[in-house]
Image (cartoon, helix red, strand yellow):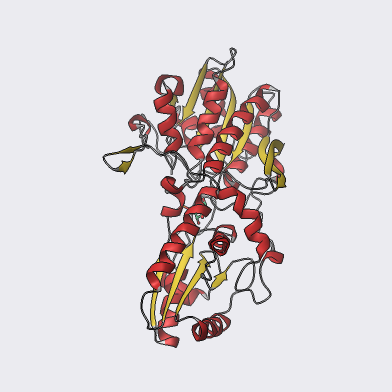
Amino acid sequence: MNIAVAQSGGPTCAINASLLGVFRHATKYEEIENVFGSVNGVEGLILDNFINLCDIILDDDDVELIRQTPSTVLGSCRYKLPNFKTDSSVYETIVENLKKHDISAFFYIGGNDSMDTVMKLDDYFKANNIDIKAIGIPKTIDNDLPITDHTPGFGSAAKYVATTMQEIIRDSSVYSSKSVTIVEIMGRDTGWLTASAALLRRNYEIAPHLIYLPEVPFSVEKFLKDVREAQEKYYAVVIAVSEGITLDPAEINDFQSGKSDNFGHKYLAGVGKALEKIVARELGCKVRSIELNVMQRCSSHLSSKRDITEAERIGGAAVKTALDGYSGRMMIYRRVSNHPYNMRIEHVDVREVANKVKYFPVEWINKLHNNVTEAAIEYCMPLIQGEQNFRMKNGLPQHYVLRTALPHHKREGKIE
Ligand code: F6P
């Protein structure tokens, strides 16, 4: 038999480690002959765009480089499958292509939307008595997948956010004049990643002085009051704000593209800039906004070793799950203890996860709605531990680039 694996959604530092987990575990089984990588997620299944990973991951050097490379070596997509009951043509094409390559298990590494794809494929396979397994492997820096304790990719992004925040704090505190620095952090619907800025407290940092998450209402008036109060104590106020907080559209529209992806999610970004303008107008002091943007997804030089190691393990466990006969499952981490940190890998029905969101617990947000509690730090701390032994070239981090897998390679059709 052969298997296929694909990567989907926004990049992380750990998604290639999960790919390796699938590949390295699968190659231990005699019954698995080839491990195909589908280029650009499910789009590769539709366009018959596969790369045999057995032909390109040849030695420990390849493995090491792929492990330290952020983003997706196979490319990604934000492709939404239709409901097969109303339109089954794309499913028929997928099955035709999978059968052509004798693929009897498909592993999809992704977030909430990608789990929608796993669920729909599994529903279609089961409804048509097609013996192909579909298994989801979680990933997202947003950490917003239900049931799993955390998601691969989050720990590394959290480590980057806290580290970069510390550098911003040092930089912004040099002058004796008053200033406000607003750092915008990703997290479409949830505040998990923004909350990780508070991890610096464990190293006795006081800043960021204010932290705003989308789980509680945001008011500009209250924000300005918070900033004014903070400025009475600290001349250089540093603020972490989630891209997902809701501002009056009139304030933020100018800074956003107004576009959405195929799942209908708006491309967020710009809330920091909008707040910068408001602070400049209302407080009149020096103010700067910094959008961490895509750097927080791909900064593998600051990745968490624990995150990368776990991501590889969960990929391997997914292969075992399919070989044990399961389909329509998503792999999860179950935290067993915090001191010492310990977790085990299990799997749940993907329907319990697909299109659902796990919000940052409101009880971990302080009463004033402008910071997070110790419980958030306690949760996050184990996930950022350890550093990768990073391979450098010419003084720069070395990345694995699969030239043949770049988007549109071998494409005969085009997918919008
Ligand atoms: O994958 C989640 C995420 O990184 C969000 O934090 C962010 O809002 C979104 O993806 C950005 O999407 P895209 O990669 O399509 O720009």
Q: Is residue 382 visible?
A: yes
The picture places residue 377, in percent across and down from the top left corner, at: 62, 59
Q: Is residue 241 left or right of residue 65?
A: right
- Residue occupying the point 53% across, 71% down: 206
The one of 87 and 384 positioned closer to us in this rendering: 384
- The quadrant the N terminus occupies is top right
The furthest residue to the front: 204
Rendering coords of residue 257 (x, y %): 41, 63
**The C terminus, quarter of image:** top left
Residue at 46%, 35% in the rendered image: 67
Q: Can residue 350 be seen in this view?
A: no
The relative height of residue 339 versus residue 268 in the rendered view (above or below) is above
Indicate the quadrant where residue 253 lies.
bottom left
Query: Does 238 sit above or below residue 157?
Result: below
At 68% across and 64% down in the image, what residue appears?
364
Query: Which picture quadrant has residue 204?
Result: bottom right
Q: Is residue 252 above or below residue 99?
A: below
- Expressed as whole percent of the image width and height from the top left, the position of residue 134 reads 63, 30
Which sits in the foreground, 75 or 198? 198
Tell me: 175 left or right of 219: left
Q: Is residue 394 left or right of residue 119?
A: left
Q: Which residue is drawn at 44% across and 81% down?
A: 235
